[in-house]
Image (cartoon, rainbow, N blue to C red):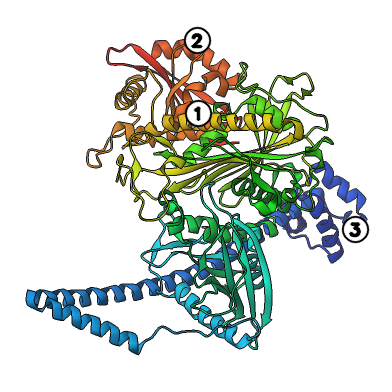
Amino acid sequence: MAAYAGKEKAAQQLMDSGKYVRYTPEQVEALERVYSECPKPSSMRRQQIIRECPILANIEPKQIKVWFQNRRCREKQRKEASRLQTVNRKLTAMNKLLMEENDRLQKQVSQLVYENGYMRQQLNASAATTDTSCESVVTSGQHQHQHQHQQNPKPQHPQRDANNPAGLLAIAEETLAEFLSKATGTAVKWVQIVGMKPGPDSIGIIAVSHSCTGIAARACGLVSLEPTKVAEILKDRLSWYRDCRSLDVLTVIPTGNGGIIELIYMQTYAPTTLEAARDFWMLRYTTGQEDGSLVICERSLTSSTGGPAGPTAPNFVRAEMLPSGYLIQPCDGGGSMIRIVDHIDLDAWSVPEVLRPLYESPKILAQKMTIAALRHIRQIAQESSGEISYVGGRQPAVLRTFSQRLSRGFNNAVNGFTDDGWSLMSSDGADDVTIAINSSPNKLFGSNVSPSALFSNMGGGVLCAKASVLLQNVPPALLVRFIREHRYEWADCAVDAYSAASLRASSYAIPGLRTSSGFLGNQVIIPLGHTVEHEEFLEVIRLEGQGFHQDEFVLSRDMFLLQLCSGIDENDDACAQLVFAPIDESFADDAPLLPSGFRVIPLDSKTDAPTTTRTLDLASTLEVGSGGARPTNEISNAHNLRSVLTIAFQFTYEDHLRENVAMMARNYVRSVAASVQRVAMAISPSLGAQIGMKHAPGSPEAHTLARWISRSYSIHTGVELLQVDSQTGDSLLKLLWHHSDAIMCCSLKASPVFTFTNQAGLDMLETTLIALQDITLEKILDDGGRKVLCSEFTKIMQQGFAYLPGGICMSSMGRPVSYEQAVAWKVQNEEDSPHCLAFMFVNWSFV
């Protein structure tokens, strides 16, 4: 009995020593120091810890292992608890926001019900009157209108200037009240943008105006920054509003209630080469609320509002900012809830009729201003918290500066302001390409950038060739994505070499256009970073070639471009843009940039569209004002999707070669425009009424091919690939197109090329249907995949199918893609003859 008791006591001591070790504070401190350096030490490392720390000498290595396991578990639990608390705070704030939005909509519904009842009464009263009483009714209505006007005359504000703070404060308080009524009430009829889903991780709730003066957009969202920091970021409009050229605060007046009134002059860029830029003269009022909220509201000062007259600038059209601003409310537990309202009248009647939709679209306003502000704040918040990782060791602020410089440089090229040194180059008669020169380009690069590397001692400057065209039935995102992925379709390697040579100190010759060798090599995209919502990408493009030789210089084998791509992932038809500039291998932070590129902006489909051709020279259809006659070949078509393509390319030149460079630039822009138009015409038919795709030449009709693919899979494997539900009415083609796995077909040739793929396949290959036929099967399979396919090919042709193990393949952009399994089967036609080979990549993802 005693022996049994002794064994039990020993076992208890062993259990206590192994499971319930009590560490002294000194031991815990020593272990914590090791944990901060190595959270998961190996067995040898744990033994080394015991040897190096005498204070841990009485602890077994197994106990040290258990301590580190528990420590990692506690760390994981703490992070998860912190994450859940953050999500809970976001959900609480979002719930409050949605409840307020619901109350606003309920009020709007009540107002509409009341208006509907009132209109019914008016219609009934109108129906009860006779024709002889019409005149009296109209007359009485006029008297009633005059009486109401006498009772409620339009307020006439006395002229107020900056020396009268009380008068400006009155305007500021009126602006504040009108802004708050738009931000939280129904002063403007808001229409929710399709596709915007509210939630703690979404960009926010986005709405645009309906039937109001000017155009307006409204956004509500959450950010993890304090209100004062949010206000500081929003007031710095130059940092996030890419169309803002300058913003000058001319007067600052503190108010007695702790607020600040500022008189501001702002200039914005024109989006295309065909109309004037806009400027604003505004009052901005910053003040706090009793609930701790911050309000920044602004409006234009006009003769009707009162206030001092603002500065004027030639070649600018004065636009009006109606009461707009930001309501920033603190959230419990940190962070802020933001309400943004932008309400602008851009004087659309001053632009050609075909371009008015650019100035009458609240969706474009929402994308460029309202959503851009909210996204920029979220970007700063996530950068501050360290949630964003960037490639290449560049700080997020540096990459953001590069993006801003590329956008600003492209906007400067498109607009060509005279005070920046631009002047038009004379041409013979009307020209479809505008040539502008700048012989003093130091203004273009800013004080922190030295442009000396771009210019030789012989003297020179910058030349810009630009043009705008109208495109038909091509979504901007699709076109810009194609231009980005398939540079060889439009670019001339000789011109790329010329642009890259401008970074060299030596002089250079003028290259020819469309050399016989064509594109010299592959395009490799090296990502640098992207914004939170993936709506903007910054990347380096390496153009791999065989070298470009001329008498005066030999260019290095590879050329590099810094490239900014935006708007290619937008579901709705938003503005898309691709801007790039040549750089050298050093990629210095202060490298001079000469941006060139493309911008595609959608036009509202409510306007008439030419139907005789898919692309037109926009300059030939311009008519200013409302009295111009419409071309007889234009008819209304609500299904047409029109967009404006703006192209601008910049080159350096030496004075003695200016005319030659101008001729080269003009011809090159014409060539690029023609190439992009051909691409647009090729892509346009792919927007079919059902799924929007076009097959390669020689392939069967889409529905027939889908039937062959599904039937062959079922015959060979005994399993149905696509389950057709007669109640939904979905066709085999539609089910195949939206299948979750990547399904693609390739030809039965010595070097198989792809002839068809579904949407998942396009995403996996990172390509478009029009470029699919340029991709071979060998390009995407790695060595292991090719070996497996060769070994299984006989089985596939004899038995009809084979299961292939998981592996790695490459997209057309050079990115590795992993897949868990692949199925290959022989697709047979109606006569059971082999038509093509089909592959299905299961559960694929980018590595």
Q: Which residue is mark 1?
A: 821
Look at the numbered disc 2 and give the secondary structure of its residue.
loop
Look at the numbered disc 1 and give the secondary structure of its residue.
strand
In the rendering, which numbered label is found on residue 55?
Answer: 3
Q: Disc 1 to disc 3, how far (Cα)?
A: 53 Å
Viewer can see residue 77:
no
The quadrant holding residue 83 is bottom right
Q: Dividing the image into 4 quarters, which one contains the C terminus?
A: top right
The quadrant holding residue 483 is top right
Q: Disc 1 to disc 2, how far (Cα)?
A: 24 Å
Give the class, few, some or many, for how many residues have Cα within 10 Å of label 2's Cα (few <14, many ≥20). Answer: few
Foreground residue among 146 and 640:
146
Give the class, few, some or many, for how many residues have Cα within 10 Å of label 1's Cα (few <14, many ≥20). Answer: some
Q: Which is nearer the N-term, disc 1 or disc 3? A: 3
Look at the numbered disc 3 and give the secondary structure of its residue.
helix
Q: Disc 3 to disc 2, how far (Cα)?
A: 71 Å
Q: Which is nearer the N-term, disc 1 or disc 2? A: 2
Q: Position of residue 513 (x, y in %)?
A: 62, 23
Q: Which residue is mark 2?
A: 750
Q: Dividing the image into 4 quarters, which one contains the N terminus?
A: bottom right
Please report the residue visible at 70 percent of the width from the left and 43 percent of the height from the top.
391
